[in-house]
Amino acid sequence: MVRKLLLASVLGVAMSPAIAQDLSLYAAGSLKAALSEVAKDFAAAYNVPLNTSFGPSGLMRQRIESGETAHVFASANMRHPRTLEGAGNGGPVALFARNQLCALARPEVTVTTDTLLEVMLDDSIRIGTSTPKADPSGDYAFELFDKTGHADTLKAKALQLTGGPDSAKPPEGRNNYAWVLDSDQTDVFLTYCTNAVLARAEVPSLQTIRVPQSLSVGADYGLIVLNEAPPAAWKLAMYIMSPAGQSVLAEYGFDAVATVQGE
């Protein structure tokens, strides 16, 4: 896939019209901290104005489909960029990072990796997730439920608190996941391990619980350059997958998987 993207980048630079315009990067909300830094580094290195917009990947895809201008789309799953590719809106799609699900818990909840399922099944425990279909994090949480043997019970009690078009927004400057737990909206919240790190940076008393291996769910992140993007969009995509971009993703807890050498 990386070889295909390299070829596409060469063709894209050769065939795209040289139109001076700011680059537009749309990306998953879970990438905000990492890709904001990558975008800043890229803009400084190549003197290219770059605008970023972050949110639930499914909603970002819908915005692109509705006609908003995005040149590069970085999704928290492979399905959304592949949907755009399948509709003829760009491509190819490249895997550029991986993530894992963890559980965040309020400090008074007694829970470990070994007891996580038992705790989630407890009638007195509220489980929070993001919103399936709108946000891949919610899809991954429901995929975890499917592995438990208690999928119907857990899906029925899950509170879809984030990532949807009508989800409540945290106060300005608050981490979404720290806020839903700190404001007592839920007891346990399933989210990416990278989000858990950011949430605990804001509220250190929160607990991060690793998901047991039998229930583990991995998240593959996909990248696509969209049609009619300026040539610099291909350079941005390659930068995200270069050692420079991958090292920043790794610093924020992502598994760096791209293998592009040099820029």
Image: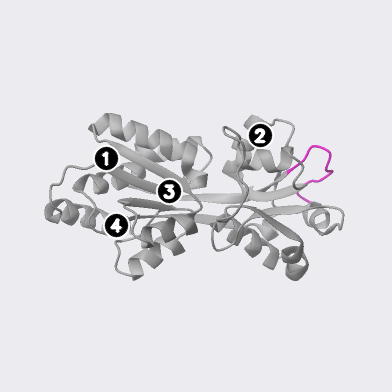
What type is the residue that disc 1 sits on? Gly
In x, y percent, where is residue 49? 27, 35
Answer yes or no: do the residues labelled 1 and 4 have beta carbons within 8 Å? no
For label 1, the residue is: 262
Left or right of 217? Residue 88 is left
Q: Secondary structure at mark 2?
A: helix
Residue 200's tag is 2
> In this picture, which residue range is highlighted in magenta?
105-114
In x, y percent, where is residue 172? 57, 34
Q: Which quadrant does the N terminus fall into?
A: bottom left
The residue located at (39%, 65%) in the rendering is 82
Magenta stretch containing residue 113, yes or no?
A: yes
Number of residues whose C-alpha sits closer than 10 Å to that of mark 4, classed few (under 14), some (14–19) or many (20 or more) = many
- For marks 3 and 4, the one nearer the N-term is 3
Give whichever of 35, 22 is nearer the camera.
22
Q: Quadrant of residue 173?
A: top right
- For marks 2 and 4, the one nearer the N-term is 2
What type is the residue that disc 2 sits on? Arg
For label 3, the residue is: 27
Answer yes or no: do the residues labelled 3 and 1 have beta carbons within 8 Å? no
Residue 256 appears anywhere in the view = no
